[in-house]
């Protein structure tokens, strides 16, 4: 089977699996991203996310993750819900966490896709990634023609907006490669203007330590810094503000993935209290991304969002 035919068949298989978009790029050192990433770390924009400063060499060179890597296959998977579960005055959870944890869903699909590739070409050296290893996902998605990096540092697609998950297969097989997409943000600054914590310092540069998603998920301190508590806007797990105001998300369509159908509700979120046992919490949220915070973390976020002294 020639390269073009193989690339085409993989595209069709990805769509069959429910993957929204797929692109292919040549595996190489990310030279243009190296200086930007180094500057981001030197400014301590990673906050307490120490893992972001580890394995930098692997983030920039796929060949250090997969021996003899020749290609990076990037995929997008839509998670946009049919309806918003939370009104503006209620405690809110980011839309990506409405359903089952995407790490499980997307990894299952990527392994199916990799098995399909093996059926076509035989044994390969490859690894599957879903935000679980040192991979600069947005950079590879952009190089694979799936979108451009917006001013809020999210990947944006003209066809689908930005409500999607990213995943990759790094592999020692060559394909027909895509070209990078040009930037279509223009002079729009809606995401920058809307961020309540001023986390978006300039186009494509986000101070992660100020981001509400970081404060409510990644930060493991007992308290959210006081200066941010009044700016959480009732977000208790993640934040969608910069996506909600993005004009390109007018093209977002509800996901067809059954595993991303909501397992949350406003009533469930409002029922979280100190009286709930840790076991109950784990039972309720066992397949949800919210499990990451633990009961104590979610209660901290609720107290901080409501500006209650804890």
Image (cartoon, rainbow, N blue to C red):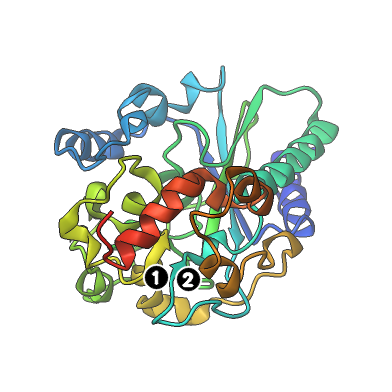
Q: Position of residue 103 (x, y in %)?
A: 61, 44
Q: How far apart are marks 1 and 2 (CA)?
A: 8 Å
143 up-or-down from 250: above or below: above
- What SS does tag 2 mark? loop
Look at the numbered discs 1 and 2 and tell me whether their residues touch, using CB distance below 8 Å.
yes
Q: Nearer the viewer, residue 133 or 268?
A: 268
Report crowding for label 1: few under 14, some 14 to 19, many 20 or more residues within 10 A (C-alpha).
some
Q: Nearer the viewer, residue 247 or 196?
A: 196
20 up-or-down from 35: above or below: below
Q: Can residue 239 be seen in this view?
A: no
Q: Residue furthest right?
A: 119
Q: Can you say which quadrant of the picture contains the N terminus?
A: top right
Which label's residue is closer to the chain start, 1 or 2? 2
Q: In this view, does 35 lie to the left or right of 176?
A: left
Residue at image mark 1: 243
Residue at image mark 2: 161
């Amino acid at each position: 089977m020639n390269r073009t035919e193989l690339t085409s068949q993989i595209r069709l298989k990805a769509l069959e699996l429910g993957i929204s978009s797929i692109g292919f790029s040549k595996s190489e050192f990310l030279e243009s991203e190296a200086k930007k990433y180094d500057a981001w770390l030197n400014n301590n924009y990673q906050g307490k996310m120490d893992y972001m400063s580890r394995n930098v060499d692997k983030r920039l060179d796929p060949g250090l993750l997969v021996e003899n890597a020749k290609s990076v296959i990037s995929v997008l998977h839509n998670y946009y819900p049919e309806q918003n579960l939370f009104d503006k005055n209620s405690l809110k959870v980011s839309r990506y966490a409405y359903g089952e944890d995407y790490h499980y869903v997307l990894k299952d699909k990527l392994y199916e896709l990799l098995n399909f590739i093996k059926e076509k070409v035989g044994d390969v050296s490859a690894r599957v990634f879903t935000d679980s290893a040192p991979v600069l996902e947005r950079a590879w998605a952009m190089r694979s023609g799936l979108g451009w990096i917006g001013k809020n540092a999210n990947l944006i697609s003209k066809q689908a907006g930005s409500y999607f998950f990213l995943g990759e297969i790094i592999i020692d097989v060559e394909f027909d490669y895509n070209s990078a997409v040009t930037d279509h943000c223009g002079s729009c600054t809606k995401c920058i203007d809307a961020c309540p914590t001023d986390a978006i310092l300039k186009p494509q540069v986000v101070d992660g330590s100020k981001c509400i998603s970081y404060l409510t998920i990644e930060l493991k301190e007992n308290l959210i810094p006081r200066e941010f508590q009044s700016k959480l806007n009732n977000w208790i797990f993640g934040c969608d503000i910069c996506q909600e105001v993005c004009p390109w998300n007018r093209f977002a369509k509800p996901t067809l993935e059954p595993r991303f159908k909501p397992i949350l509700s406003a009533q469930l979120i409002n029922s979280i209290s100190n009286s709930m046992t840790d076991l109950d919490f784990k039972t309720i949220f066992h397949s949800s991304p919210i499990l990451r915070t633990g009961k104590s973390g979610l209660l901290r976020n609720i107290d901080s969002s409501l500006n209650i002294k804890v």
